[in-house]
Amino acid sequence: MKKVVIATKNRGKVKDFETIFGPMGYEVVTMFDVAPDMEIEETGTTFEENAIIKAETLAKALNLLVIADDSGLMIDALNGEPGVYSARYAGDHDDEANIVKVLKNLENIPPEERTARFCCCLAITGPDFPTTTVFGTCEGLILEEKRGENGFGYDPIFYVPSQEKTMAELTPAQKGAISHRGNALKLLQEKIGER
Ligand SMILES: O=c1[nH]c(=O)c2ncn([C@@H]3O[C@H](COP(=O)(O)OP(=O)(O)OP(=O)(O)O)[C@@H](O)[C@H]3O)c2[nH]1
Ligand SMILES: [Mg+2]
């Protein structure tokens, strides 16, 4: 089976990638499989900088073609927060605490002003493959309480008007078809196809 290496240690992302790459005949290999002890410091201030740091670090260590994903939630009423710091907004990768903090900070904001978007930068790099990045987004609204059990992170409070559901109420395949990650992957396929 063909393999695609992703520089991530986020099991939610792994599931998103498996949902999209599986039907294309790819086995998704992650840092859990190839570099479980490696910690990559995300010192960038943009999604693109962090995606490049993650992709280049793992690609150099393995001497393989690697994709990395840096992503997050940008809320207009919070001036784009939590943004690049989405994973560590309230606690380090504590999805529940992160959601509580977002809801608290939006307490007095009316529904029509709770606009937000998920953003995803994918970087791909490897031996004989110049570092290339693509960017995908997905527009939505932040609800006042959680809905749905699927997905990860902020998915239960992120309502997607075009689907009339939260991201966590969508099936993995439905999420992949409209998400920031799915949209970025479509662009990446186009770019790779050009080579
Ligand atoms: O509800 C969500 N649905 C999504 O589809 C999604 N995509 C990103 N996010 C949030 O943004 C952080 C990424 O930060 P991030 O890119 O540094 O990844 P991470 O640290 O979780 O894993 P890694 O890939 O770096 O190993 C994540 O932890 C989440 O809080 C999402 N939340
Ligand atoms: Mg991270």
Image (cartoon, grey):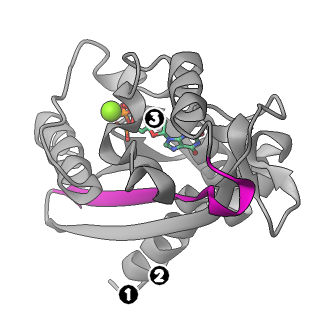
> Position of 139 compared to 157: left or right?
left
Q: What residue is pinned by disc 1?
A: 194
Q: Which residue is drawn at 76% across and 45% down?
A: 172
Prevailing SS of the magenta stretch? strand
Instruction: Give the structural element (helix, strand or loop) at label 2.
Output: helix
Is disc 3's CB within 8 Å of ligand 1? Answer: no
Span of residues in magenta? 109-126
Residue 159, x across and y down, in percent: 75, 52
The reply to whether the magenta stretch includes residue 123 is yes
Q: Residue at x 55, y 72 (%)?
A: 186
| Dot placed on the residue nearer the N-terminal end, 1 or 3 | 3
Residue 164, x across and y down, in percent: 88, 60
Outermost bottom residue = 194
Residue 71, x across and y down, in percent: 41, 49
Front one among 107 and 152: 107
Question: Are the residues flagged by discs 3 and 2 in contact, CB closer than 8 Å?
Answer: no
Question: Are the residues flagged by discs 1 and 3 in contact, CB closer than 8 Å?
Answer: no
Q: Residue at x 28, y 21 (%)?
A: 35
Instruction: Give the structural element (helix, strand or loop) at label 1.
Output: loop
Which picture quadrant has residue 57?
Answer: top left
For the question of whether residue 183 can be seen, the reply is yes
Camera-side mark, 3 or 2: 2
Residue 29's tag is 3
